[in-house]
Amino acid sequence: MPSTLIDLCEYREDIRKSRFIALAGPAESPEQAQAFLARHSDIGATHNCWAWKLGSQYRSSDDGEPGGTAGRPILAAIEAQGCDQVVVLVIRWYGGIQLGTGGLARAYGGCANKCLQQAAKIELVMREQFILACTFSEHALVRLRIQEAGGLIEDEAFTAEGVNLRIALPPPAATALAEQLTDLSRGRIRLRLSQP
């Protein structure tokens, strides 16, 4: 099962007088990945090379290094570590010694790999979105049942009648939670799959 990072991770290494800093973090969307890159890139560095992977979507950049020597090795490191929903930035300050294409690929991929190896990770649990509505008096108990089922509350909207919730649940937990909520509300609360 793929995993993502809990928080920002950093790794530093000097390779033949060039200084490399790898920064890795979680990202749930291309916009979050690009925001991470914008926030952490160093315009004073020689190169800011990066890659991100979000499910079947991925992108990478060599940022001026010879084609295929930076972005692709960083992406390969993400995949080798079994990561998803991750962005990795490797910043290089040139030290005056040419590394060659093989040396560059090893340096960028190696720094990314070492950074991800030491990062705190959490297993990604696939979840589906559901919607439900409950009364104010049921709200606290409904939230507790969702948490016990391994669900996440993505949105709560308070109305005059009660609370509308959009939640994300691991698919195997949906049936048991639906039964609990039906029992709790005497059949009034219905868990429905959210339409995209």
Image (spheres, rainbow, N blue to C red):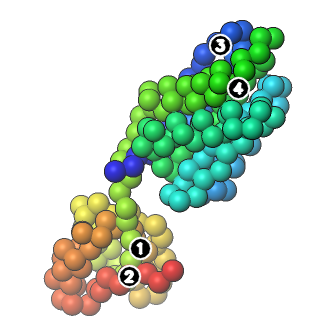
| Amino acid at pointer 4 | Thr
Q: Earlier in the sequence, mark 1 or mark 4?
A: 4
Q: CA distance from mark 1 to mark 3?
A: 46 Å
Please tell me which residue is depicted at 54% across the width and 55% down the height of the picture: 54
Up/down of 189 relative to 29, above or below: below
| Amino acid at pointer 2 | Leu
Which label was assigned to residue 129?
Answer: 1
Which label was assigned to residue 54?
Answer: none
Q: Earlier in the sequence, mark 1 or mark 3?
A: 3
Of helix, strand and loop, which one carries label 4? Answer: helix
Residue 117 in the image, given as x and y percentages of width and height: 44, 29
Q: Is residue 149 left or right of residue 106?
A: left
Of helix, strand and loop, which one carries label 3? Answer: strand
CB of mark 4 within 8 Å of CB of mark 3? no
Up/down of 103 relative to 149, above or below: above
Q: Quadrant of residue 118?
A: top left
Up/down of 89 relative to 163, above or below: above
Label 4 neighbour load within 10 Å: few <14, some 14-19, many 20+: some
Please name which of the two marks, 3 or 2, marks the residue nearer to the observer: 3
| Amino acid at pointer 3 | Ile
Q: Is residue 68 left or right of residue 123?
A: right
Q: Which residue is mark 4?
A: 101
Residue 38 in the image, given as x and y percentages of width and height: 74, 43
